[in-house]
Amino acid sequence: MAPSKKSTKKVVTPKASKKADPMFPARARSTRIGGDVRPQGRDLSRFVKWPKYVRVQRQRAILYQRLKVPPVINQFTKAVNTNEAASTFKLLNNYRPATPAAKRAATKAKAAAKAAGTEAPAGKEFELKYGLKHITTLVEDKKAKLVVIACDVDPVELVVWLPALCRKMEVPFMIIKDKARLGALVHQKNAAALAITGVDKSDEKALANLVSMATEQFNDNKDLVRKWGGGIVGLKTSAKLEKRAKAQEIESAKKAKSQGL
């Protein structure tokens, strides 16, 4: 007779309900600041403590919008557009000065040519000039054909007088973005202003177009020396002013209606 198989089924006994511990009450998971890990994909930029230099940059930008900016300073916000800047840099790039290594090589070549009794290779006839003192002298002597000023020079007092000098001496100038791009043309980190004293015959037409554009937009533009900047209020202030204006309109309408009756 075969042995009987024992049943392997487990008997499940009902669990007793767990009593709530009054010392440690159950709470829902919190994903607020200081709680659990927040879900991914949420914008946390408003909770970030930005570095001080970032806060100062943003506060300065807001202040420039809110305060009334004199025309002498406000003109530096009116830089040339992208297409005009591209044509300007295309011309200026042809007259970049030599690098320090190239200058040393040219000096050695001149010394070798002098020792051999031959003529030294001629360098560029026209090059970009930089340095505020040098550019000031060129403008005062009316030797500069075109002056390019960066719009983001800090402090602005370094170049705030240069447009007025260019207008007085009738030297074409333009304001362009930015000082790092100007510095790259002359192998520097930054450059507040550049000047060009002449170009080759092949580039005379391009220079004439830039001169006429600069004269029209900057030298002869009277709005630049008259128009104040800034005075832009924020969203809260504009909403408050609109609400106040509506209330005044309603009040004036009531007065008119009462006087008419």
Image (cartoon, grey):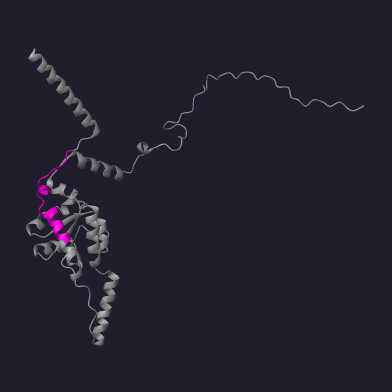
Q: Quadrant of residue 124?
A: bottom left
Q: Is residue 148 magenta?
A: no
Is 83 located above or below residue 234 in the figure?
below
Q: Quadrant of residue 232?
A: top left
- The number of numbered discs placed on residues in the rendered structure image is 0
Residue closest to the far top: 261
Chief secondary structure of the magenta portion = helix
Percent from the top left, x then y, of residue 193? 19, 59
39 on left or right of 77: right
Location of the C terminus by quadrant is top left
> Which residues make up the magenta segment?
209-231
Is 99 located above or below residue 73 in the figure?
below
Residue closest to the far right: 1
Q: Quadrant of residue 182?
A: bottom left
Residue closest to the far bottom: 117
What residue do we see at 14% from left, 19% from top?
251
What residue do we see at 19% from left, 28% from top?
242
What residue do we see at 25% from left, 83% from top?
113
Percent from the top left, x then y, of residue 236? 24, 31
Q: Is any part of residue 161 visible from this angle?
A: no
Location of the N terminus by quadrant is top right
Is 64 located above or below residue 107 in the figure?
above
Q: Is residue 225 magenta?
A: yes
Percent from the top left, x then y, of residue 118? 24, 86
Percent from the top left, x then y, of residue 40? 45, 37
Foreground of the two, 82 or 141: 82
193 on left or right of 42: left
